[in-house]
Amino acid sequence: MKQQLVKILVIDDDPKVPWILSEGLSENYEIISARDGDEGIQMLSKNKPQLVLLDIKMPGKSGIEVLEKVKSIDNQLDVIMLSGHGDTPNIVESIRRGASEFINKPFDVKEVEIHIQNVLEQRRLRQELTQLKSVLKAKSQYDELVGDSPGILEVKNIIEQVAPSELTVLIRGDSGTGKEIIARLIHTLSERRTESLTKVNCAAIPRDLLEAELFGYEKGAFTGAHKTKPGRFEIASKGTMFLDEIGDMPMELQSKLLQVLEQREFVRVGGIHNIKVDVRIVCATNRNLEKAIEEGLFRDDLFYRLNEITIKVPSLRSRKEDIPLLVDHFIRRYNALYEKEVRSISSRAMKILMDYDWPGNVRQLENLIKQIVVRNDESIAYTSLEAVESPPPIRQTPHIPEVGETGYSLKKRVSNAIEFEEKTVIKEVLNKTNWNRRKAADLLGISYRSLLYKIKDYAITN
Ligand SMILES: Nc1ncnc2c1ncn2[C@@H]1O[C@H](COP(=O)(O)OP(=O)(O)OP(=O)(O)O)[C@@H](O)[C@H]1O
Ligand SMILES: [Mg+2]
C-alpha cells in the first residue's frame, strides 16, 4: 500500500529553500511553497498542509505576523521557524506565540528531517493523548449507567454497537428508567462527542411554538418575527439532536421531522429554501407509540423510521438485583455533593427497598437515597415506602392470663391487656423509626423520658 505523504508548506521568500527541501528530504514528504505570508495563508486553507516551515524574515508580513495568523486559523497546526543570523529575539517571540521548533539557516537537510520527524511524533502523541482522554471521559460517562442485571447489560451492549454509527435511535421505557442518561451516552460514545448535544423536550414546549423552535423562522413569518432566527436543528448541526418525549410531538410537525430524517433538510417557518443539516437524531418516549398510531396521534411512517434501532429500558421492578449497586452509587454521589459521610444502609432498609415496587423507577430510588443521605436518616425508607407497600403488621392477640395466674381480678386483667398493647405499639413504632427514640416518642404522643422509662420497664429490645 502506498504511504500517505506528509504535506509541508514552506513559506520563504528565498526560492532555494523549498527546492533544497524537496530535493533533499526523503520521499515521505510533499513540499508545497509560498513566497510570502499572504500567499502562504491562502494556501493554508486550500491545501491543508500537516506542517508549516516559516521564514522569520520576509518582505511584507513578518514571520511572526504570519505565525500568529496561522495559529488563529488552526491552533493545532505545527509551525517550524526558519531563522537567520541574529534572529534570537524573534525566535524567543515566535516560541512564545506557539511555534513548535526553530531551525537555523543555512541548514543541513538531514537535520531538518530529524526536526520534522520530532515535531510530527510529538503531534501524534498529543493526538493520542486527546483521544485517550475522550475515551476515558466516555468510559466514565458509561459508569453513570449503573447496573449489571441482564436487562441493563443488554442495553449497554446495544449502546456500544449503535453509538458510533449514524443511526437514528429510539429509546423507550417508563418514566425514570434512565432514558436521558442513555441518550447522552450515545452522543458521548459517538464520533460527534466533541460537538454539542441539543435537547428538545417536545412535551415542554407549547405546540404552536415548537415548529419555530425546532426549525427556526424567517423574518416576518408571523407577528412578532422581527428577525430571522435559526431553529434548534440548525444549532445542533454537526452534533446530536435529542428529541425527548417524541410521543408528544404534534401530528403536523411529525411529517416535517420525517423529512429531516429522510433527506436531512427542512424549510424554516415562513421560508422557501431548503436548509441542509448534519445531525444525528436520538429520540425518547415513555408513551405507547403503537397505541398512539391506532388513535391517529402518531404517524406510522415516522414510527417505522424511528424504530430502526430501539432501545427498551427495563423498569426497575424487573431488575431489582441492580438496587444495591444503585443505592451505593447514589450514596456516593450525594455524600460528595452534600459533604456527608453516610456509609451504607442497614440490611433491613435494603430489604424494604428490594420488596418495593418502584413505580417511579430509578428516579424515585435516587430521590429517596438523596433524602436519606442529606438527613442521615434511613428511617425515611420505612416511613415513605413501608407505610404504602407492606401489609399492616399482624397483631398477636393479647395474652389473656389463665385464671390461675391472676384469678378473676378485673383490675389485673385490664392492666395486663394495657401493658400488652403498650408494648406492642411501642415496639412497632421503634422499628418503624429505626429505633429513633425521639421520633418514636413524637409519633406515640408521649414524652421522650416516659418512652425511655417504658422501654426499660417493659424490657423492650432491638
Ligand atoms: N441506570 C442508572 N444508573 C444511574 N442513575 C440512573 C440510572 N437510571 C436512571 N438514573 C437516574 O435517575 C434519574 C432519572 O433518569 P432519566 O432522567 O434518564 O429518566 P427518563 O427515563 O428520561 O425519565 P422520564 O421519562 O421521566 O423523562 C436521573 O437522575 C438519572 O441520573
Ligand atoms: Mg427523560
Image (tube, rainbow, N blue to C red):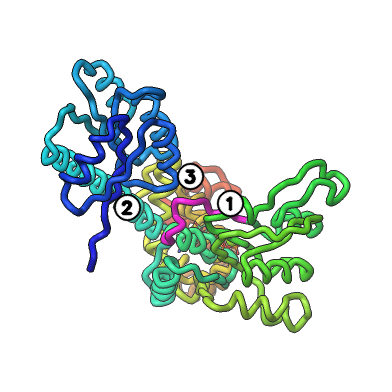
Give the percent coordinates (x, y) of residue 52. 31, 39
Rounded to the nearest angstrom, the CA distance separating label 3 from label 2 is 38 Å
Ligand 2 image-quadrant field = bottom right
Q: Is residue 117 left or right of residue 273?
A: left
- Label 1 vs 3, first from the N-terminus: 3
- Residue 131 numbered mark, or none: 2
SS at mark 1? helix
- Number of other residues with Cα within 10 Å of mark 1, as a class: few under 14, some 14 to 19, many 20 or more: few
Rounded to the nearest angstrom, the CA distance separating label 1 from label 3 is 22 Å
The range drawn in magenta is 189-199
SS at mark 2? helix
Give the percent coordinates (x, y) of residue 342. 38, 47
Camera-side residue: 144 or 113? 113
Is 38 situated above or below 280? Answer: above
- Residue 374 numbered mark, or none: 3
User: Which residue was labeled with disc 1?
Assistant: 443
Residue 321 visible in the snapshot: no
Q: Quadrant of residue 143?
A: bottom left
Camera-side residue: 174 or 318? 174
Give the percent coordinates (x, y) of residue 170. 56, 71
- Number of other residues with Cα within 10 Å of mark 2, as a class: few under 14, some 14 to 19, many 20 or more: few
Camera-side residue: 277 or 365? 277
SS at mark 3? helix
- Label 3 vs 2, first from the N-terminus: 2
